[in-house]
Image (spheres, helix red, strand yellow):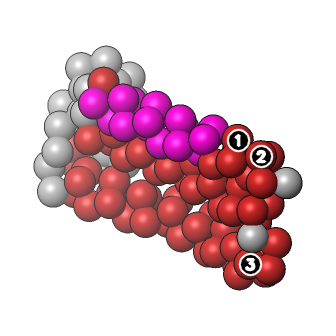
Amino acid sequence: MILAGSILMLIGSLIFFLSALGVIRMPDVYNRIQTGTKATTLGTIVVMIGMAFIHPEWTTKLVILILFIILTNPISSHVVARGAHFSGQKMSDKTIEDKLETPEEVK
């Protein structure tokens, strides 16, 4: 069980690393938020499942933490993205559509 937990924790750490690379490579704040949030949510879940294999007595607490992360990470990234949009952060030139654009902002 310790080996399986260690492998899962290693996989989660790899997901965190790839998330960091994605944040560096993305062209604008909106893509960076998406990359950071989705990958760190998955990485955290995998690491916590690995911890549950290593410490089975922590499983209940880890499940509660996983549920908390699943519920709060998307909401927090949505709030940050809306704040960035309404404060005037420019989107990448590669962005095709702005669904938050109001009719006054249409050029």
What's the magenta bit mostly, secondary-structure-wise? helix
Mark 3 or 2, which is nearer the eye? 2
Residue lying farthest to the right in this orientation:
1
Of helix, strand and loop, which one carries label 1?
Answer: helix
Report if residue 48 is visible in the image: yes
* Distance from the alpha carbon under mark 3 to that under mark 2: 17 Å
Residue 105 lies within the magenta run: no
Please tell me in which quadrant of the rendered image residue 50 appears.
bottom right
The kind of residue on which mark 3 rests is Trp
Q: Tell me if 12 is positioned left or right of 36 in this view.
A: right
Q: Residue 84, image x and y in percent? A: 23, 54
Q: Which of pointers 1 and 3 lies earlier in the amino acid sequence?
A: 1
Name the residue located 36 percent from the left edge and 29 percent from the top edge. 21
In the image, residue 86 above or below residue 24? below
Residue placed under numbered mark 3 in the picture: 58
In this rendered view, identify the residue nearer to me: 57 or 62.
57
Are the residues tagged 2 and 1 within 8 Å (C-beta)?
yes
Q: Which of the image's four quarters has the C terminus?
A: top left
Secondary structure under the numbered disc 2 in the rendered image: helix
Three-letter code, disc 2: Leu
Res. 63 in view: no
| Residue depicted at x 58% and y 67% | 69
The residue that disc 2 covers is 3
Question: Label 1, label 3: how many angstroms apart (C-alpha)?
Answer: 18 Å
At horizontal 63% and vertical 48% (from top left) the residue drawn is 9
What residue is shown with label 1? 7
The residue drawn where x is 43% and y is 66% is 76
* Figure check: 8 above or below 19: below
Residue 92 image offset from top left, x and y in percent:
25, 26
Residue 3 on image: x %, y %? 77, 46
Q: Which residues are magenta?
A: 10-24
